[in-house]
Amino acid sequence: MKTPVVSPTVKKIRTYLAAKDQLNDTIIRLRLYLPEEGYDYYAGQCLTIYNNQGIGRMYCLSSVPGLDDFLEIQISLASNGALIPWIYGELQVGDQVRISPASGDCFYLPSNLHQPLMLIGTGIALAPLYGILRDALVKNGHQGDIRLFHQTHSPDEYYLIPELMALQTQYPNFSYTHFIHGKNPVNVTLDVPEKSTSEMAFGTIEDLSLWQLFLCGDPSVIKEVKQDAILLGAKEKNIFETPFAIPDN
């Protein structure tokens, strides 16, 4: 997502880095202590994190309020964003960090525990979907069918596989598929060697009118998937999206 234009009047909340881990060669995970004054958010929303020079960059939350006693963001080191050198090299556990309030409307609300849910993401966009998934499945005990599709361009971008496979084993209403764009996916048998993201996700569904969709990642993929979903009857009010723009610095 692009570095936001930050107004001097934007509230900056103080917290501290609790943990810093690398999930694979290209993805790093930060866990921040919950601010002393509290922090209101939904899993899947975004916050802006600021470096020591006050430069801000927006990331999505994969933690779940009520389940996690920290704020978690997952960051692609391949994004070449302005904060990457600071996050990867300088930022250490215990350091003070400034963040913005959470924002965004791509999150789960337990209004209908039996409604089927579809979560589709590309690359690092698995981060908000992982939070949304756990919010629905673990925190709120969602009973409807939940399907998660994660598309990447290379195996290097795969992560959280043991965690997701464990959830799939524990919750029979949840299924998880990860696949490389243009190649055969894991957990799915294909009739043809290549399928689009929409064909992967919607191939066994004739009518999406009852489904709630969460779409995160590459804007062109999200646009195409949304258009295809609407053609299959999905209602726009049931489609929530967070397009990730390519960083410009």
Image (cartoon, grey):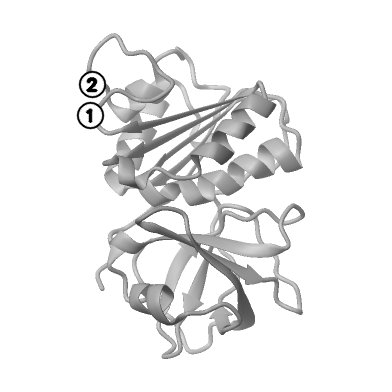
Point 22% across, 17% down: residue:
193
Point 49% across, 72% down: residue:
48
Marks 1,2: beta carbons within 8 A = yes
Q: Residue furthest top?
A: 191
**Between disc 1 and disc 2, whose residue precedes?**
1
- Residue indicated by mark 2: 194
Relative vertical location of residue 25 with respect to residue 167 in this rendering, above or below: below
| Quadrant of the image containing the C terminus | bottom left
Relative to residue 39, is residue 74 drawn left or right? left
Q: Where is residue 227 shown, x and y percent of the image? A: 34, 32
Point 56% across, 63% down: residue:
103
Dot 1 falls on a residue whose secondary structure is loop
Q: Amino acid at mark 1?
A: Gly
Q: Where is residue 141 shown, x and y percent of the image? A: 75, 34
Using the image as rendered, state which of residue 170 and residue 65 is in the foreground.
170
Q: Amino acid at mark 2?
A: Glu
Q: Where is residue 184 shown, x and y percent of the image? A: 29, 23
| Quadrant of the image containing the N terminus | bottom left
Q: Where is residue 159 shown, x and y percent of the image? A: 44, 45
Point 23% across, 21% down: residue:
194
Relative to residue 7, is residue 151 drawn left or right? left
For the image shown, how many numbered marks are present on the structure?
2
Relative vertical location of residue 193 with respect to residue 198 in this rendering, above or below: above
Relative to residue 54, is residue 99 drawn left or right? right
Dot 2 falls on a residue whose secondary structure is loop
- Residue indicated by mark 1: 182
Q: Is residue 177 visible?
A: yes
Relative to residue 41, is residue 55 drawn left or right? left
Q: Is residue 5 visible?
A: no
Alpha-carbon span between mark 1 and mark 2 = 5 Å
